[in-house]
Image (cartoon, grey):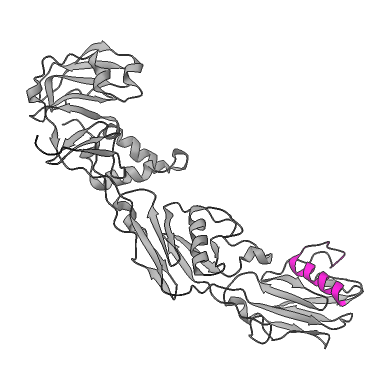
Amino acid sequence: MRFPIFSDLTLAQQKEISRIQAISEDFRLASETAFLTALTPYLTNQVILKDADDLIVIASGNTVPTGLEGFKVGAFFIDVDSAKVYVNLGTISVASWDSITDISSAEIAAGAVTADKLAAALDLTSVALSKLKIETGTPVNAVAATQILELTGVIVPGSHAESVLTANTILDGDIVTIGSQPYRFKTEPAQAYDVALGESDAVALDNLKAAINATGTPGTEYFAGTLAHPSVVATDNAASTQKIVARVPGTAANALATTSSGATLAWPDTTLGGETDTSNPGIAPETITIGERAYSIVDVLSETNGADAIPYQVLFGANSAACLDNLKLAINHGSTEGTNYSTGTGVHPSVEATTNEDISQVVAAKVKGTAAESIATTDTIGNGAWAGATLDNGVDGTVGLAKQILADASFLYMAIAANTVADANWRKIDLGSVY
């Protein structure tokens, strides 16, 4: 058995490791932690130097690799846990190690082994420099998968169904009904959903607004035990009018019945969104979906009307360009939650919104590499679309150890830190021309 290192793992395993390591330890599943633990040797072992015969000259890790093959006779192994250096007195087929020195934790520097730190502890005089080699390769850095949303026209925001109730000398016992819930005006409220009539229509409508929203003072403006209406909120009112707005945008509340008794209370239509005069129908929001997170475009946030906030609503704003600005803020959880997008909208876990123009928005995966190409991008926009069904154009980085060096005909490459398929730690030096 050979010395296990990260590059020995399958590409699928490397991608899964990168995915899990991108998650804070506090939020990892037990199965994810167990997956990393089972592969600990592959994550901690490092081959620092090989010779031209592909034999390991210097390596490090947390467990002395007794009995493994591939180590040069006289090779050194640094046990990071015990801070000891071992020499191979066995063969290239079966390594057998003998401790030759202790090295301080300062020399190890939290597991980062360099030639300078080994110089005082290791004797390389038996290793012929002509036998050492720089491996050939053209490593690449990981690139995040991206996708672009492009508009061909105006985004159509969703809206809330609404209607306006008009009063003209409300009488004791008059009833107004919204959906299946009646509200009865009484000089002396006697049961739930009775509304105090008061000394004028203006006061009566103020009390009706409080009853519909379950605000104000129960037992004063309306009878105690009255609950907030489940489907609508009462918003703007005046001396003789009260606007009623659906809690949720879309068409569902359009058919909500609006009726009244007598001639003192009048609705413009028999339903909330009946399209007569001030009875305006709700429109279903267009949506933009990234992964499992769907953003709904609305002309007014539900919470602005006084309803409960609906997470992942995005305010359309002045125009489609403003809408894309607000979408970017919602994805990245920028300023301001509750204004540009709804309260309860969290930062997107998998992508960030990057380049933004008047008619386009680019998103990029937070974890670089091809694994993010499985993130779906869909929409219901009539005048625009994503350029593709998923994120694409991701590039997996070349796996490498910290300080590993590779070369090709044009460049010398070094990994400034350990590089996984999701990292971009390779740097290159132009070898120039013959001199």
Q: Is residue 324 left or right of residue 173?
A: left
Image quarter of residue 228: bottom right
Residue 211: x and y in percent read 79, 68
Choose between 355 and 177: the one closer to the eye: 355
Question: Residue at point 50% right, 69% down?
Answer: 320
Which quadrant would the C terminus be assigned to in this image?
A: top left
Image quarter of residue 13: top left
Which quadrant would the N terminus be assigned to in this image?
A: top left
Q: Is residue 232 left or right of residue 427?
A: right
How many badges with numbers are in the image? 0
Q: Is residue 323 above or below residue 15?
A: below
Task: Specify whether residue 221 is painted magenta.
Answer: yes
Choose between 358 and 75: the one closer to the eye: 358
Choose between 152 and 225: the one closer to the eye: 152
Image quarter of residue 54: top left
Question: Residue at point 61% right, 68% down?
Answer: 300
Task: Specify whether residue 147 is painted magenta.
Answer: no
Residue 420: x and y in percent read 29, 41
Q: Is residue 392 left or right of residue 309?
A: left
Residue farthest toward the front in the current orientation of the protein: 435
Q: Is residue 257 left or right of residue 395?
A: right
Residue 136: x and y in percent read 13, 38
Q: Is residue 382 above or below residue 6?
A: below
The magenta region covers 201-223
Question: Residue at point 20% right, 39% down?
Answer: 8
Residue 45: x and y in percent read 26, 30
